[in-house]
Image (cartoon, helix red, strand yellow):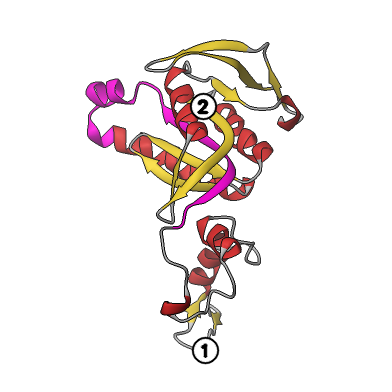
Amino acid sequence: MEHQVTTGETPIDGREAEVLSEIVPGPATQDIGPALDWYQAKQNSGLERPDELTTGDTHLNVNRTFVFADLSGFTQFTRQHGPHEAVKLLGEFRRVARNVAAKRGVRVAKWLGDGVMIVSVDPTAAIAFGAHLIHHFAETDLQVRVGLASGIALLFEGDDYIGEPVNLASKLCAAAQPDEILGACELADLPDWVKADEAISVSIKGVGLIGDIHRLIPVL
């Protein structure tokens, strides 16, 4: 007879408990998203009456690493194989990206069609995320390209980021070749299984030539 788990409300059968254990593999971890940023930046207790708060708009500057990754040639793939196959491809990319992000302790900020934007408080974890994606898909039919950059950005309206490192990471992703990572990062932040070629200059459309960019390569 299949066992049941009691939660105090509706009983959960054995299969449901197994699924839940896969979704929640361990104890809750600390929030590293915008909610925590705003909580830590609050003035006073945060419990004041409405007429006791200071007036004016509030903006929050944060130091983050931003990663953009997308599927290279996705539009052409859709034309050749149709939308149903394209959706399967995109689903696989998102599944892997979401899983790797959770395990690396970085946050999926938003999905961008055939791409994803990642935000991290730790540059090494962000680099590891990008390199992991490149390594994972290197032997598949999927081709991924990645751009990343670190710096100060403005946290706008609670959950959006505006600033130079965000724009640069996005532009570097667009400039990268399939299976390539272009990063504006410190070499000291690289995981020990990622190496960097000599610094290069990259021509960014609408910006010009940007120097001190590294081509990052997972070495496994």
The kind of secondary structure element at disc 1 is loop
Residue 188 appears in the rendering: yes
| In-front residue for pair 58/139 | 58
Outermost residue toward the bottom in this view = 8
The image quarter containing residue 139 is top right
Left or right of 32: which side holds 145?
A: left
Locate residue 86, reporting x and y percent: 30, 33
- The magenta stretch spans residue 206: no
* Separation of marks 2 and 1 at Cα, in angstroms: 47 Å
Label 2 crowding class (10 Å Cα cut-off): few <14, some 14-19, many 20+? many
- The magenta stretch spans residue 82: yes
Mark 1 lies on residue: 8
Q: Quadrant of the C terminus?
A: top right
Locate residue 23, reporting x and y percent: 53, 61
| In-front residue for pair 149/155 | 155
Q: Residue at x 44, y 24 (%)?
A: 171
Q: Residue at x 62, y 49 (%)?
A: 105
Mark 2 lies on residue: 147
Residue 141 appears in the rendering: no
Q: Which residues are magenta?
A: 58-85
Q: Amino acid at mark 1?
A: Gly
Q: Amino acid at mark 2?
A: Gly
Q: Residue at x 51, y 64 (%)?
A: 19
